[in-house]
Image: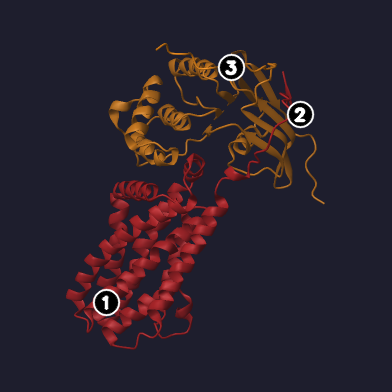
Amino acid sequence: MPISAPSVRREEFTIRAVPPLPALHARGICKAYGGRRVLDDVSLSVAPGEAIAIIGENGAGKSTLMRICAGLIQPDSGEVSVSGRVGYCPQEPGLFDLLSADDHLAMFAPALGLSRREAVHQGHVLLSEFAFPLAQRAQCRHLSGGSRQKLNLALALLGGAHVLLLDEPYQGFDHGAYVSFWEHVDRWKREGMGVVVVTHLLADRELVDRVVELRIAAEPLVEP
Amino acid sequence: MSIRRILVIAKLTGVELLRRRIALGLLTALPLAFYGSQVSRGSDAVITGGVAMAFSIAGASIFVALTARPVDPRLILAGYHPTELLLGRLLLLELFGLLVTGAFSVIMVLGSNPAHPWGLAAGVALVALTSVPFGLAVGGVSPHELEGVLILIGVVGVQLTLASNQLATKFLPFWGGQRLLDHSVNQIPMGAAVPANLAYAAALFAIATYVMTRRAPAVGGAKRHSRQTLAVTARGLGHSR
């Protein structure tokens, strides 16, 4: 008996180009500390597969904007919307001095829905790409500043992310690790991540798709 | 709330605490020093040593809370609930407190021969039990270690100078344990010491939870809404190149 092909109902579709949704969209962000306006109506969008650099003088609010985008602090006004998970690498590595890299990976594992084994495996892959001294199994207090920062970065990447917020992520990196970092940014872009890097380095501006400059407000905020 | 997450935090808090060998040794020696200095004065030594246990357990709890503070926002951002972090630390520190309590109670029972040895052990355990939420709450509100330690010295120091039947001591968190220790050596009535102490412990844990939750990242606060515009610009103070 011949097998008949399943009937297929043809439907007409109108296909039109739809711009991709931004991975991160912040709009009208305002933030003041102690009567000084740090961010005044700042908006920022990052598309999937795009890398942007945020530059500006010290005190211009770069880290504050990153913390707001990560959801670590609330803006006084404005909105942030994010597609998917945010990986945040703070400027200062927040690590337990007496725990090792593996201990940190194990600690983050259940929060990210990973088993200990999965987290340690993923973490080792990430850390070895940045030439982290895995063999030492050292507690964080015995690590160099650059190695601490590599662990800091790996924790931001652990479990995968759709948006990466990297606040001066390569402090203490040697030249090789710095070059490797930017190669990774390219790779993350190809994988569709939106990448935001806070930087002071002029050379970095050539390595991103866009540069956003934050300037210090001329007038201090006067509370009524 | 996930039991696995709580247990992971408890385990790694324990790993970190065990690596503080010198600090841990000094903290544990403190109540022994207080007890040893008073042992010739009879029953006073048990009460002083037992209440001084708070230095040891609350001190360790303060350090745990303050050490974790810079990391907690990232852990919460990754997916932990603030209460899971607190419960993990509470679990580990209470176990540590009970271990120290056991050893210290044996020393004091052998050294002072109290009328109610089990009452002595229960009194020390009650002090240890309350010390953990006390330390977590103090660690939550203190800006730095120095302030936290000063609060600890102030509260426990005042408690040590007061007798358990004085009105003022009832307003301090370790009164219940102090009263139970007094009962174990001087056979005075316990009154509402135990329920009062448990209420203090619960209230202190509630404070620690409140502070932790208040400080937690605003992950849910970043408004998620349908997006209609795709402006890729920075306005106001910022501009895009």
A212 sits to left or right of B162: right
Figure chain in red = B
Q: How crowded is mark 1: few (under 14 residues within 10 Å), some or many (20 or more)?
A: many
The structure residue drawn at horizontal position 69% and vertical position 25%, both measured from the top left corner, is A213
Percent x, y of residue A135: 28, 26
SS of the residue under disc 2:
loop
Chain under numbered label 3: A
Residue drawn at 29 percent across, 29 percent down: A136
Task: Please state, as top left, top right, bottom left or bottom right, where the C terminus of chain B lies in the image.
Answer: top right
Asked whether the viewer can see residue A12, the reply is yes
- Tag 2: amino acid: Arg
Instruction: Give the residue number, with chain letter if any, for mark 3.
Output: A204
Mark sitting on residue B235: 2
Look at the picture and state if B124 lies above or below B17. Answer: below
Chain letter of disc 1 in the image = B
For the point 32% across and 75% down, the residue is: B48
Give SS at disc 3.
helix
Q: Say if labels 2 and 3 share a chain.
A: no
Find disc 1 in the rendering and name its residue: B120
Residue A85 at x, y = what percent?
Answer: 53, 33
